[in-house]
Amino acid sequence: MDPTGIELTLGGRAVRYFPGGAAFEPPEDVRYLDPVEDGLLERNPRVRRILFTPFPALPPVVLYLHWSDGGGLPELDARVVAREAGDEDFGGAVTGQTVTRRCRACAARFAVLYSVDFPGFPDMPRRLAGHRHIPRCPACDARWTAYVLEVIRRLPDA
Ligand SMILES: [Zn+2]
């Protein structure tokens, strides 16, 4: 498997796709890659990593495709590897990046996967409306910011 990813076009945008468990050798200038959180997301069955270059002169950014239910992802990986995957295979996906969130109610800190826009998915509001997310702090159950896709881990108190 190519450790620099497999070519894929999503909504007319060229990306590099990494099947689950595939070797990952990111370019040195990649942005928004947190190695610790990336290593944890790599084993998440609802997540697949892509690299996307927003503008030709800029380095690539890492984005994570996220599905509410990742049951079909091994089959999707095989379709991408075989160059058979198309936009219809990604209708249930949204895109996220890793960020730190601090609960306003209890001050617990978490590394989370948070939804972000991706120009290949111009219908992101519709996608998010049907997407499962985590609306409450896992520590105290207070409602928090919308569109946390995954809680990756709790961070030490600051
Ligand atoms: Zn809390």
Image (cartoon, rainbow, N blue to C red):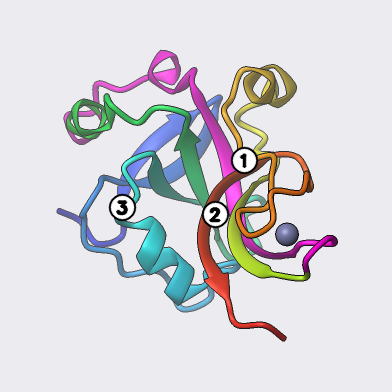
Left or right of residue 64, residue 101 in this image: right
Label 3 crowd (10 A; few <14 / some 14-19 / many >=20): many
Residue 113, image x and y in percent?
58, 52
Q: Which of 48 and 71 lies nearest the eye of the viewer?
A: 71
- Report which residue position mark 1 lands on: 134
Q: Amino acid at mark 3?
A: Gly
Q: Residues within 10 Å of mark 2 (few under 14, many from 20)?
A: some
The magenta stretch spans which residues? 80-106
State how many labels appear: 3
Q: In terms of depth relative to the viewer, which is nearer, 73 or 112? A: 112
Give how far across and how far down residue 103 sits, in percent: 77, 62
- Residue 63's x, y, as percent? 53, 51
- How far apart in space, not on screen, are marks 2 and 3 (Cα)? 25 Å
The mark found on residue 5 in the picture is 3
Residue for point 42% across, 13% down: 88
- Say whether marks 1 and 3 touch (CB < 8 Å): no
Image side of residue 134 versus residue 82, left or right? right
State whether label 2 is within 8 Å of ligand 1.
no
Q: What residue is shown with label 2? A: 151
Q: Amino acid at mark 1?
A: Ile
Q: Element under label 1?
A: loop
